[in-house]
Image (cartoon, rainbow, N blue to C red):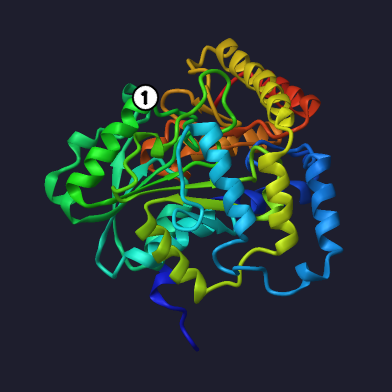
Amino acid sequence: MVHVAGRVEQLPPYLFVQIRQKEREARSRGIDVISLGVGDPDHPTPGHIIDALNGAARDPAMHVYPPDEERGMTSFRQAVAQWYAKRFAVSLDPDREVLALIGSKEGNHHLALAYLNPGDVALIPDPAYPAYVASAIFAGAQIIRIPLSATTGWLPALRDIPTDQARRAKILWLNYPNNPTTAMAPSSFWQEVAEWSRSNDTIVVNDCPYSEIAFGEQPASLLCSGALDAPLVEFNSLSKPYNMTGWRIGMAVGNADIIAALRKVKENTDSGIFGAVQRAGIAALTGPQDNIHRMVEIYRRRRDLVVETWRNLRLPIDEPQATFYVWAPIPAGMRSIDFASLLLEKTGVVVTPGVGYGSQGDNYVRMSLTIDDLRLEEAMERIRSLGQWK
């Protein structure tokens, strides 16, 4: 028998694949499942973006390998730079500091391949989106988890990272607005990050696909520090703000040397994004933005319903300020996987156990707001009517 590579054996079961499997099993038993597990916008992509795709797809020039292949079309990179200037007041050189991505998940994976040698240290928060751990494992890195907690606003205490770990680390992964905790990072935190990154010669990446899903103050960019000479890179995506998860298009922006290394990995890995999708991405970034505001209000209404339900159950909960998730505490004395299993068995409602993001998440579950209003209302009613947690 041929054995798989050790790196594959090291991978933990992918959280969202497990959730979908549990959903299928429950449905096979006749349970009416309401899934709050996976964050996938339930509204369609705006019409002007679809129109741009349709028009570009009819252009024979789009039917070959995309222009500039691994870098992304010049016009797309220019649109990204313009969007960053308007949205964050960050000035980017589209030729040296912008790179098109097949979604931000791809960027995280290729960053690990570009910079992590076997045995190098990667710092990953706990809790954190599971893909960061997988990317580090594929590169053969030593993973050190940095605990986050509600008492620090789910921000890492950089000064508390041991000096030897900070100096050995090649990459620190961050993700604000944060999945799963919904936390935001203020501009002052990004200034601190830039100083820490430069002093330790450690790459800091902010995975930022939820930058436009916020209910009050608008999130800041890692690059608002202006320290593009420091080893900083930010990944963003069109998936969440423009309801384009299946289109697979995003961007890396930041330090020119890091962008060049990512590009070199991509030159040997993929052939870029379908040109028509890049044309649609330009339409998204440069066209009307009103659909984002409409979706934020929809998510706000759904957020308020979930928060109200949790408070009625006498479970203390912080009101999320960003993302389309709710990070909800569970009853004392329970583990998140047991609570999630109880909800599925007793109510047919699927939530994501917080331990899937790290040990520090075991007192929480994550619920997605990307579900029809009526089904969400029904899910909350089922949870309210459960009556007991054991």
Q: Is residue 217 left or right of residue 49?
A: left
User: Of the residues shown, which amino acid type is indicated by label 1?
Assistant: Gly
Position of residue 129 measured from the top left corner of the image (x, y, whole percent) = 47, 46
Q: Is residue 279 shown above or below 58?
A: above
Residue 143, by quadrant, is bottom left
Instruction: Determine whether 213 is above or below 54 in the image.
Output: above
Indicate the position of residue 262 as horizontal and vertical percent values: 44, 63
What residue do we see at 76% from left, 67% from top?
62
Q: Is residue 196 above or below residue 372?
A: below
Identified at 31% across, 63% down, the residue is: 141
The quadrant of the image that shows the C terminus is top right
Q: Is residue 211 visible?
A: no
Residue plotted at (71% across, 36% down): 348
- Element assignment for label 1: loop
Residues 4 and 304: in front is 304
Q: Is residue 312 left or right of residue 118?
A: right
The mark tally for this picture is 1
Q: Nearer the viewer, residue 383 or 311?
A: 311
Q: Farthest residue toward the left?
A: 164
- Residue 267 percent coordinates (x, y): 51, 73
Give neighbour class at mark 1: few <14, some 14-19, many 20+ (Cα, 10 Å). Answer: few
Q: Dot 1 corresponds to which residue? A: 153
Q: Is residue 317 visible?
A: yes
Residue 41 placement (x, y as % from top left): 71, 39
**Residue in the foreground of this view, choosing between 292 and 91:** 91
